[in-house]
Structure formats: structure tokens, C-alpha cells
Image: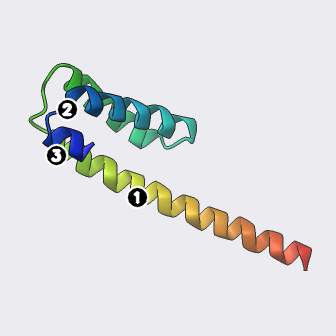
């Protein structure tokens, strides 16, 4: 998204936002979904004054979700290993 924004490739930016919106909804990361929805509306309207703010928020929430998922996977793996032992 940052590359598309920096190179003013707005169709690619819109596609990336839309894809992340759908993907985050599929895995239940609804805060990223909502941020992408808002960013997508603004991008479609050509209002990109706050694009860096949206990207920073999306990146922060994505990283938080990624960390939570990694922790949950580790917890499940350890529980599985204990049962198997």
C-alpha cells in the first residue's frame, strides 16, 4: 500500500486496501476491516490527505493481530504436545 501510495498508483492502492479488508474480515480481525473500509471510501473519493495516518493505524492493528495469532497458535501447539506426551 505504501509503495502504491508513494508512486500515486491509486488503482493498485485501492485493490490492496480492498484485499486486506476482505482478508481481515475472513479471519475476524474486524478492527483492520473497519480501518480499511474507511480508508477505501476516502481513497475512492480521492481524499488521501490522511493516508499515512490510516496506513499507520492499519499496520499497528495488523501487527497486534499477528502477535495475538502467533501466541494463540503457540498455546494450542503446547497444549497438543502435552496431550500427546
Q: Which quadrant would residue 35 be assigned to in this image?
A: top left
Residue found 37% across the figure and 52% down from its top: 61
Query: Which percent across, then down, holds residue 13?
Result: 27, 33
Disc 3: CA contacts within 10 A as few (<14), some (14-19) or many (>=20): few
Image spot of residue 34 (x, y percent): 38, 34
Label 3 vs label 2, nearer the camera = 2
Quarter of the image that includes the C terminus: bottom right
On screen, residue 81 versus residue 10, left or right, reads right
Precedes in sequence: disc 3 or disc 2: 2
Q: CA distance from mark 3 to mark 2?
A: 15 Å
Q: Comparing marks 1 and 2, which lies closer to the viewer?
A: 2
Q: Is residue 65 above or below residue 72?
A: above
Q: Disc 1 designates what residue?
A: 63
3D distance between C-alphas at marks 1 and 2: 25 Å
The first of marks 1 and 3 along the sequence is 3
Can you tell which mark lies on residue 52?
3
Q: CA distance from mark 1 to mark 3?
A: 16 Å
Residue 9 tag number: 2
Mark 2 residue element: loop
**Which secondary structure, mark 3?**
helix
In the rendered structure, are the residues bearing label 1 and label 3 in contact, judged by CB atoms less than 8 Å apart?
no
Disc 1 packing (10 Å; few <14; some 14–19; many ≥20) = few
Q: Is residue 70 left or right of residue 8?
A: right
Occupied quadrant, residue 81: bottom right
Amino acid at each position: 500500500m505504501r509503495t502504491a501510495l508513494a508512486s500515486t498508483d491509486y488503482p493498485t492502492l485501492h485493490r490492496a486496501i480492498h484485499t486486506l479488508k476482505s482478508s481481515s474480515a475472513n479471519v475476524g480481525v474486524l478492527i483492520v476491516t473497519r480501518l480499511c473500509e474507511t480508508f477505501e471510501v476516502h481513497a475512492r473519493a480521492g481524499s488521501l490527505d490522511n493516508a499515512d495516518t490510516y496506513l499507520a493505524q492499519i499496520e499497528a492493528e495488523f501487527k497486534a493481530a499477528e502477535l495475538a495469532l502467533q501466541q494463540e497458535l503457540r498455546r494450542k501447539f503446547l497444549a497438543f504436545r502435552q496431550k500427546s506426551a
